[in-house]
């Protein structure tokens, strides 16, 4: 029997409210299939399952709020025989866990309406019968103000933990962007309006490629040691229309072309603001990238989202006086910043990362290549 548990969808999540199931007992599920919707303090998230099997019991009902790690459902592995007990002739089928729990609660399972395979009584049926009143739907009854308040609490908890536990260091680099913007203008001239690229995708791609030379900035610090990640999954900070922000992951950024990244970024922003993110996008960013250039700030010095070990920030694109070939010119520039965890790297490696980032943005045509492969 396989336990399907409520995953942690970020360091600031301690519990979640089940909004809906997309499967029923008896359904066959595949790896990566969305099986449930869970409301966190930030958004409703489509939760995927990463084991193949047949749904045996749904142990949590929509409307219930449960801690991270709670078993939401049980599955039979491929080839495993049904666990539900055969019912004696004329009696309702009752799963072993439901029968045991019913005895504990003094409930006669024969009187319950079963929701399992062929009407069998499940543990969830027993738990539901034991509740004195129908569960309130916290996910749908919460007002926008309630959600924003909960989101602020969650963000405060994660950032408070970050500032307590992570010894940050900060670096910045002003990067000339004339070549990158000229290449972007030429590239966009070849594309339909709907497919044109934003500078943000060049910045994301350059970050991913620069991290290949400084892998100690890409990964997690857990249980007293650094765990490098095998790929760059960039958590993109996205502000929500009602307030607050989320930072879901763009996967395998270094392996994608700018055009692919543009489509993926547009889709991610749209779904984040529509409240239809997936659990894999919320749980596995290996580094966070935040771009506050649209808000007009020169630079952003962010707080690392634990257990990640680095955050890269970008300010606004602006023209500045720049000495080049002995002459002062007006040159478009962007300020790139790095907040990094001293337990995983030091300022020397951080400076190498920013230098590598600057060099990638001076050869924008090279960013067109997917660069498939493991990190250095």
Image: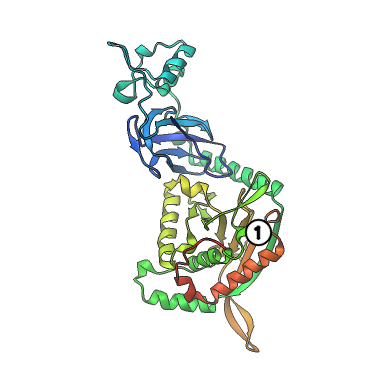
Q: Quadrant of the N terminus?
A: top left
Question: In the figure, 350 relative to 182: above or below?
Answer: above
Q: Quadrant of residue 325?
A: bottom right
User: Front-most of 331 and 27?
Assistant: 27
Q: Position of residue 58 (x, y in %)?
A: 40, 28
Residue 334 visible from this viewpoint: no
Q: How is the image coloured?
A: rainbow
Q: Position of residue 161 (x, y in %)?
A: 66, 45
195 displayed left or right of 7: left
Residue at image x 40%, y 61%? 263
Q: Position of residue 280 (x, y in %)?
A: 47, 47
218 displayed left or right of 256: right
Give the farthest residue toward the bottom.
326
User: Front-most of 300 and 101?
Assistant: 101
Q: Quadrant of the C terminus?
A: bottom right
Residue at image x 36%, y 72%? 191
Q: Residues within 10 Å of mark 1 (few under 14, many from 20)?
A: many
Question: In the figure, 80 relative to 256: above or below?
Answer: above
> What secondary structure is found at the residue carrying circle 1?
strand
User: On the image, numbered disc 1 is attached to which residue?
Assistant: 339
Residue 195 visible from this viewpoint: yes
User: Front-most of 262 and 53?
Assistant: 53
Question: In the figure, 21 relative to 90: above or below?
Answer: below
Q: Position of residue 335 (x, y in %)?
A: 61, 69
Residue at image x 56%, y 59%? 290
In this rendering, the count of numbered labels is 1
């Amino acid at each position: 029997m396989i336990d399907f548990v409520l995953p942690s969808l970020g360091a600031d999540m301690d519990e979640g409210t089940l909004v809906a199931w997309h499967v029923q007992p008896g359904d066959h599920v595949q790896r990566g299939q969305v099986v449930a919707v869970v409301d966190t303090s930030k958004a409703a998230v489509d939760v995927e399952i990463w084991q193949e099997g047949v749904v045996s019991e749904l142990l949590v009902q929509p409307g219930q709020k449960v801690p991270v790690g709670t078993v939401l459902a049980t599955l039979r592995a491929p080839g495993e025989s049904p666990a539900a007990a055969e019912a004696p002739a004329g009696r309702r089928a009752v799963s072993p866990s439901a029968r045991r729990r019913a005895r504990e609660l003094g409930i006669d399972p024969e009187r319950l309406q079963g929701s399992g395979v062929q009407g069998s009584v499940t543990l969830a049926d027993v738990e539901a019968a034991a509740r004195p009143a129908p569960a309130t739907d916290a996910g749908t009854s919460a007002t926008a103000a309630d959600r924003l308040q909960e989101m602020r609490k969650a963000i405060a908890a994660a950032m408070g933990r970050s500032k307590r536990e992570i010894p940050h260091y900060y670096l910045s680099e002003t990067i000339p962007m004339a070549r990158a913007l000229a290449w972007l203008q030429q590239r966009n001239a070849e594309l339909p309006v709907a497919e044109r690229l934003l500078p943000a995708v060049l910045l994301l791609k350059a970050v991913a490629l620069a991290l290949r030379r400084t892998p100690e900035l890409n990964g997690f610090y857990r249980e007293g040691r650094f765990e490098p990640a095998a790929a760059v999954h960039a958590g993109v900070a996205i502000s929500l229309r009602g307030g607050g922000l989320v930072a879901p992951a763009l996967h395998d950024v270094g392996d994608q072309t700018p055009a692919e990244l543009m489509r993926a970024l547009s889709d991610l922003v749209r779904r984040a603001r529509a409240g239809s993110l997936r659990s894999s996008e919320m749980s596995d960013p290996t580094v966070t990238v935040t771009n506050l250039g649209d808000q007009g700030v020169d630079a952003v010095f962010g707080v690392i989202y634990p257990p990640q070990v680095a955050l890269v920030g970008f300010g606004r694109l602006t023209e500045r006086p720049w000495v080049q070939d002995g002459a002062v010119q007006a040159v478009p520039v962007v300020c790139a910043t790095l907040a990094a965890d001293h337990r995983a790297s030091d300022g020397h490696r951080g400076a190498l990362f920013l230098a590598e980032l600057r060099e990638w943005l001076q050869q924008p045509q090279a960013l067109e290549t997917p660069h498939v492969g493991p990190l250095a």
